[in-house]
Image: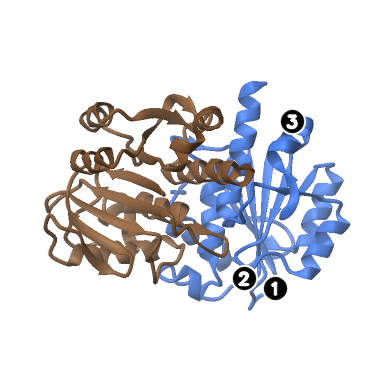
Chain colours: A brown, B blue
Amino acid sequence: MKDFIIIGNKAVSGGKISLNDLPGSAGRMDVLCRCVTAALFISFGMRRDVNVWLILKGGPEPEKIVRFCGETMRSLNPDERSSGSLIQKALMIEANDTEKQSTPGVFVRHGDLTRLLDKFTEENRPLFYLKEDGEDILELIRTDAAALENGVYILGDNQGVFEEDEKTIENAGASKISIGPISLLSSQCVTLILNALDRTAANE
Amino acid sequence: MKDFIIIGNKAVSGGKISLNDLPGSAGRMDVLCRCVTAALFISFGMRRDVNVWLILKGGPEPEKIVRFCGETMRSLNPDERSSGSLIQKALMIEANDTEKQSTPGVFVRHGDLTRLLDKFTEENRPLFYLKEDGEDILELIRTDAAALENGVYILGDNQGVFEEDEKTIENAGASKISIGPISLLSSQCVTLILNALDRTAANE
């Protein structure tokens, strides 16, 4: 199982989202949509062993987490508007602290990064924080493939990860990893992580 | 210099494109838009040494080639709608056999794969065809990094590459390469190729 947490610093947690303007109306929701596509899609199918957790920090409602679950996902296409539409629907139902399914494979609840990382820590899942000065995933995978294959990967959006969240991530004991010499889009990082894992799995 | 050729089997070459329905109204133009983003964007900037050539084979007008030129690109954002809008504008001007600039960094002309590959062959550019049974790029890059760094990469869209185009590519002498054990979206392949090149350049 692989989990990707994407921190949407400005991504709205309610109100009207215009699918015609995901970057502007929804707080760069396009960044999060691209991450969903990168994490769940392969050429002729879907990665059933992947979850994507979108943390929507941009208000106006309390912080929410929208989860895209590869295992049960239906009605998702790779274009940004498709995942944007499912996020829109998730934000239309009344959320509380318990996950509710808004459409098949998409879940929503109130929540924040601290609580989410607590959950994964309780499950003994290894946490990895994508950061330019982290250890190269291609090096790390040679020595600790098992951890990476069961990893929870934490990524920022176009604004990166702010100090408070970074402290939360560090306190949770996440290891810093990088995907190469150039800082890339969050969605590109997701693609590179999964490819490294695909290659390792194929060689086992 | 790196060039990416994406074959849009159903991508429309004219008529009305709805930016609200790039997959349906424009013949899976979303696939091509994602390739543009994957090829040109890094986290805080643009790859100025990359061109993306979109071959629009879906009619109703004669086949066209829209080129996104990293060197001179302006007014492009990473969301699909942004590149879709520039393609829409490119298709609104009257095309002929000579490239015309429709917006800064975007060019359009009539043309097809054969003619495009002829151009690159005349320029002695090495051609690489993305194909599942090709040589792994991470192997090839160890022995022939120089060719890859100056490569022209040919990719299909969600339908792949049809037999006629495949013959054209083989006749042009392209080498088959692959990006790993699992067949991925065209845009994901672009990301993986560029990351392999970034890594090699950083080690030189």
Other-residue count near label 2 (Cα within 10 Å), few / some / many at <14 / 14–19 / ≥20: many
Q: Disc number at residue B142?
A: 3
Which chain hosts label 3?
B
| Residues tagged 1 and 3 counted as in contact (Cβ below 8 A) | no
Disc with the residue nearer the chain's start (1 vs 3): 1
What amino acid is labelled 1 in the image?
Pro
What amino acid is labelled 2 in the image?
Ser
Residue closest to the eye, A95 or A87: A95
Q: Position of residue B150 (x, y in %)?
A: 74, 37
Disc with the residue nearer the chain's start (2 vs 1): 2
Judge whether B163 appears above or below B191 on screen.
below
Q: Position of residue B187 (x, y in %)?
A: 56, 53
Residue found farthest to the bottom: B60
Q: Secondary structure at mark 2?
A: loop
Q: Disc number at residue B62?
A: 1
Residue at the image position 24 percent from the left and 27 percent from the top: A171
Label 2 and label 1 in one chain: yes
What amino acid is labelled 3 in the image?
Arg
Q: Is residue B193 left or right of residue A129?
A: right
Residue closest to the eye, A27 or A137: A137
Q: Secondary structure at mark 1?
A: loop
Label 1 and label 3 in one chain: yes
The CA span between labels 2 and 3 is 39 Å
The CA span between labels 1 and 3 is 41 Å
Residue at the image position 35 percent from the left and 52 percent from the top: A52
- Quadrant where the image shows the C terminus of chain A: top right
Judge whether B114 appears above or below A196 on screen.
below
Q: In front of the other: label 2 or label 3? A: 3
Residue at the image position 39 percent from the left and 70 percent from the top: A74
| Circle 2 residue | B13
